[in-house]
Every structure is written in structure tokens, then in C-alpha cells.
Amino acid sequence: MNTILITGCSSGIGYDTAKQLHALGWRVFASCRRAEDVARLHSEGLTDALCLDVTDSAQIEAAFAHILSATGGRLDALFCNAGYGQVGAVEDIPRIALHQQFDTNVFGAWECITHAMKTFRRQGHGRILVNSSILGFAAMPWRGAYNSSKFALEGLCDTLRHETHGSRIFVSLVEPGPIATRFRPNALEKFRQYIDIGASIHADSYRAQLNRLEAKGDAAPFTMSSPDCAAVCVKALTAAKPKPRYRVTLPTQVFWYLKRLLPTRWLDAVQRAAVSGQGNNH
């Protein structure tokens, strides 16, 4: 039986990937920050679900110790999915908000990977999947903190892929575009917590951001369902030779090629146009 640790499983891509792998016979250690979410997963049949806040090193260490004890020292895969998006112009993001963004999106994933690598090296195999984004290679306005965290994950995985070359340890990125998850409500909470709308030159743009974050239904064209995105994650985790990148949704595919074909200034204009309904640049 294959075993996996997935972070950020309370909802969305992590939750649906955990459910799909469990249905395939995997032993899934689905982790969530809140105990009530872990209890819910237990009631749904994910009996190995556990509490894990990836910003807490002691919890990460305890989670890996628990998993290895429960499996006799085996772990086949790690899916670093936990993350959120801090919205706001670069000039308005306070240091504490940036630190929290990287603590969850980057440092937590990095630390989980270092723990997993010890087991993967010892047993001679393993695979790592990291949830990046279209914004991991195509930067867009109002998302400086999130863009930067996902660019960092891309660099991490590209480097680790070199360092595991020739082994049976595979490293892949999944790069979703718009997915129907709780991403917007979580981003809205952090936006309200750290951005002083009235004091910013970007106040009008921020009001457009609030409209987007508070809107019901899909926020962008070509939005994919979370289960469909999870199916791509399952493919990455079960393929005999997984690809380095899995670009999910049409916008991700389009911007991947535009970045390689267009001069930077042209690409900048296209990326601004992609969020043109979300405020003006100053």
C-alpha cells in the first residue's frame, strides 16, 4: 500500500486529492490545521487524518514521527498543498504579512520536504508534488506577496530536481490557474487583516479587489473544479515517470507559452489586461 502525506486538506485541492487517492487504495495522511477539520475527515473515512500547521516546526517533526511509526518507517509521497494568497500592492504589504505568506507557502513546504527527503533517501524512492500556481511564473498586479512565494517554490523544486537526478525520487510542480476552492474567502480574510484600504493610493483598485473576493460563483473564465484539478495531482503522483510540471487550466497553458514568445513589455501588458477589471495601476 502506497503512503502519502498531504498538507492543507480541509477543503479544495488537498481534500479532493486525499479522497481520490484513498479510493485508489492509498494510505493517506491528510493533514489540516484545525482539529474540527481532522474530525470531519475521520468521519468521512480518512482515518489517518492528523493535525498539522506547517508554520510550526514542532508539529511538522511530530507529524513525520507519527507517520513513520504508523507505517513501519515508510513514506512514498509528499504533496505540499497548504497555502493561501495575500492580496495587496507591494508598497502596502507590511513585513508581518509577507512573513506569514512565506511561512505557510514556502518555509512550511521546504521543511516538510527536508523531513521527507530523509526517508526517501533511506528507502531509495519517493516523490514530491508541490502546489504552485500560474502566478508562479506569470506575475500579475495586486499579488506581489503570493507571486513571490510561488516563484520561490518554483525555484525550490527546479533545484531539488537537479539534486535528485539519477535517483528514484521525483519532484513535480502542479501549476493551477483558476480553481473553484475556498481560496478567495481565505484571501479576503488576510486582505482585510493587513491592508489599510483608505490610506492607500490604490484605494479604488482595492475596492475592485473586494468585489472580486466577495463575489459568488467563479471569479474568472475557464475556472476548473477542485476534483478535476485533484485528478491531475493523482496522475502526477501515480505516473511511472512524472513530468516536472503539470499546467492545469487553459489560462496556465496560454500564459506559459506567452511568456516564452512575447517580449517582456508585451507580456506585461497582457498580464495587466488579464486583471483589468480588478483596478487601475498608478
Image (cartoon, rainbow, N blue to C red):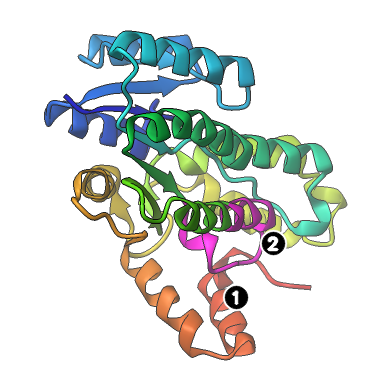
Provide residue 261's location: percent of width, then percent of height: 47, 89
Name the quadrant containing residue 97: top right
Q: Horizontally, is 86 left or right of 230 in the view?
A: right
| Amino acid found under the numbered disc labelled 1 | Arg
Classed neighbour count for the residue bearing mark 2: other residues with Cα under 10 Å, few (<14), some (14–19), many (≥20): many
Name the quadrant containing residue 20: top left
Tag nearer the camera, 2 or 1:
1
Provide residue 98's location: percent of width, then percent of height: 74, 43
Residue 272: give its label.
Answer: 1
- Front residue (pair 165, 208): 165
- Front residue (pair 172, 19): 172
Residue indicated by mark 2: 205
Q: Horizontally, is 262 left or right of 191 in the view?
A: left
Q: Which residues are magenta?
A: 132-152
Classed neighbour count for the residue bearing mark 1: other residues with Cα under 10 Å, few (<14), some (14–19), many (≥20): some
Instruction: Work out whether 214 lies above or below 100.
Output: below
